[in-house]
Structures are given as structure tokens and as C-alpha cells.
Image (cartoon, rainbow, N blue to C red):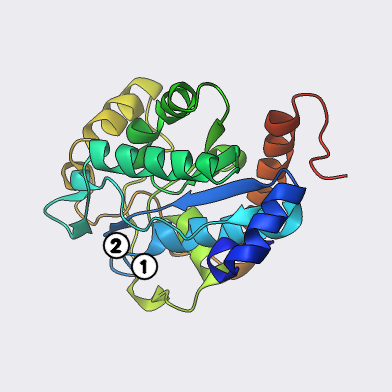
């Protein structure tokens, strides 16, 4: 793994010229995560996953874009940018990478509210680069078996595995949907995407009280393993081995 921000210009250009590198761009958010997790939770988790994936696959790791689209958490704390702003930033980063001879890019998303902004980026970059740049967008929770939550068991376990910023004494049970019908859950998901506090007053979706670092490490490893498999398949089109 090479963090692109740490490289010097002549060395970096020689690297890119000699090898078909893949750039990995993590995207997070700054928003409330209940009383026990920091507002940087999404950015912290996606940054850690991106670093591990980059280490194992020898990707060029870009700095995390910390700000995301989190207006749905208002009036709870959120530092948000618009969907169009996030999309514009990412498209311009991808085009800049392409102009610097880095033609394969993975955007790794860490916040649910960013998905709409990210959806059309591969097509936009393909058009702007005349088909010479490829962009793949992954949201990390699609690469685990457990059902995702917000500041619940999964996110809290992941944070316990990677961070010392978790305040478990403050953890409280949030909205539990396991026994709800599919129709009711779909309705709540739709409502939460517009106003999260209207669905769960605590700001928590799930129950973080039994979260552990051990569980977090297992979930983390599963996510990294499955992202590696998917990235290998997408980037090579024919083989799971990216680098010979």
C-alpha cells in the first residue's frame, strides 16, 4: 500500500509510468452517531477499511473525503455538503487522476446518504475521459453478511476494533427492526433517508450495548476479504489476481 500524499513527484510519476496502478478514494461523512460514537465514525471506518484493502492489493490510497451528504440527520449534528457538490468533487478527482495517467479508480463509500451522489459517477467519468478511465463504486456494508445499522452493534463493533474514541458507558438501545414486516421496514428506511430523527429519537438504529472489538475485527476482516474479491474481478474482467 502506498499513500499517494506521501510520495514525491518524480518518484510517483515513475511509479505510474511503470505500472498500471489503481487508486482508492475513501468517502465518509461527519454526522451524529448517537451518544457513544464520534461524528467521524463513517470516515474513521471507511478510512481503516481502505487502508487495509490498499495494503493487501497494493493500491494507491488517496486521502479520505471526510464530508458527505448527511442532511437527513438534522437537527442532530451534521456537517454536510450537497449531493451535487460531492459528485462534482469526486468526478474532478477522477478526471485529475486520469490526466495523471491513473486510469482505474475505486471509490469506497462509508455513508449511506452518499449513495445517490455516487451512483452516476462511473458514467460521467467514462464520458469525460472518452472511455479511457474506469471508476468502480463500492459501499463497504454490501460486503458483509450482517445487516447494517447506524451506531448499533455493527458500527460500534467496527469502531471498537479500530478506535479508542468509543464511549461504551453512554451506549443506549436504539430502534430495533428485526421483528418488523418487510413492508414496515421499507417504509422506515424511506422515512429515515429524509429525516433520521423522525424514525429514532436516540439517533441510533440497532443496539450497540453488546458490541465488542472481537466482533468488530471479524466483521472488518470479512469486509476487506470480500472487497478484495470484488475489486479483483471488476478490474481484471477475467482473473482474481490484480498484480502479477
- Pointer 2 with pointer 1, Cβ within 8 A: yes
Q: Quadrant of the N terminus?
A: bottom right
Q: Tell me if mark 2 has few (under 14), some (14-19) or many (20+) residues whose alpha carbon lies within 10 angstroms of its own.
A: many
* Residue ID at (18%, 48%): 197
* Residue ID at (42%, 30%): 121
Residue sitting farthest toward the left: 75
* Residue ID at (43%, 45%): 93
- x then y, percent, for residue 117: 33, 34
Tally of numbered tags: 2
Residue sitting farthest toward the front: 10
Q: Quadrant of the C terminus?
A: top right
- x then y, percent, for residue 112: 38, 41
The residue indicated by pointer 2 is: 34
The residue indicated by pointer 1 is: 37
**Mark 1, secondary structure of its residue:** loop
> Vertically, is 229 above or below 162?
above
Give the side of residue 103 with respect to residue 193, left or right: right
- x then y, percent, for residue 21: 69, 47
- x then y, percent, for residue 131: 55, 22
> Vertically, is 124 above or below 179?
above
Residue sitting farthest toward the right: 244
**Mark 2, secondary structure of its residue:** loop
Residue 66's tag is none
Give the side of residue 70 with respect to residue 225, left or right: left
| Front-most of residues 120 and 188 | 120
Residue 218 makes an appearance in the image? no
* Residue ID at (33%, 25%): 186
Q: Quadrant of residue 146?
A: top right
Amino acid at each position: 500500500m502506498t499513500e499517494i500524499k506521501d510520495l514525491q513527484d518524480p518518484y510517483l510519476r515513475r511509479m505510474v509510468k511503470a505500472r498500471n496502478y489503481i487508486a482508492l478514494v475513501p468517502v465518509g461523512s461527519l454526522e451524529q452517531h448517537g451518544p457513544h460514537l464520534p461524528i467521524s465514525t463513517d470516515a474513521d471506518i471507511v478510512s481503516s477499511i481502505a487502508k487495509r484493502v490498499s495494503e493487501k492489493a497494493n493500491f494507491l490510497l488517496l486521502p479520505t473525503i471526510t464530508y458527505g451528504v448527511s442532511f437527513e440527520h438534522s437537527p442532530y449534528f451534521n456537517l454536510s455538503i450537497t449531493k451535487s457538490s460531492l459528485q462534482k468533487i469526486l468526478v474532478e478527482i477522477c478526471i485529475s487522476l486520469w490526466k495523471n495517467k491513473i486510469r482505474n479508480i475505486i471509490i469506497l463509500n462509508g455513508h449511506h446518504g452518499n449513495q445517490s451522489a455516487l451512483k452516476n459517477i462511473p458514467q460521467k467519468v467514462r464520458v469525460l475521459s472518452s472511455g479511457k478511465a474506469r471508476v468502480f463504486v463500492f459501499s463497504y456494508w454490501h460486503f458483509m453478511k450482517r445487516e447494517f445499522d447506524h451506531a448499533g452493534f455493527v458500527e460500534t463493533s467496527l469502531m471498537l476494533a479500530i478506535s479508542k474514541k468509543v464511549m461504551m458507558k453512554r451506549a443506549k438501545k436504539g430502534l430495533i427492526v428485526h421483528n418488523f414486516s418487510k413492508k414496515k421496514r421499507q417504509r422506515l428506511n424511506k422515512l429515515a433517508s429524509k429525516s433520521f430523527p423522525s424514525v429514532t429519537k436516540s439517533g441510533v438504529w440497532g443496539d450497540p450495548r453488546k458490541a465488542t472489538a472481537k466482533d468488530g475485527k471479524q466483521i472488518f476482516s470479512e469486509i476487506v476479504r470480500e472487497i478484495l474479491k470484488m475489486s479483483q474481478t471488476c478490474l481484471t474482467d477475467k482473473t482474481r489476481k490484480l498484480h502479477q
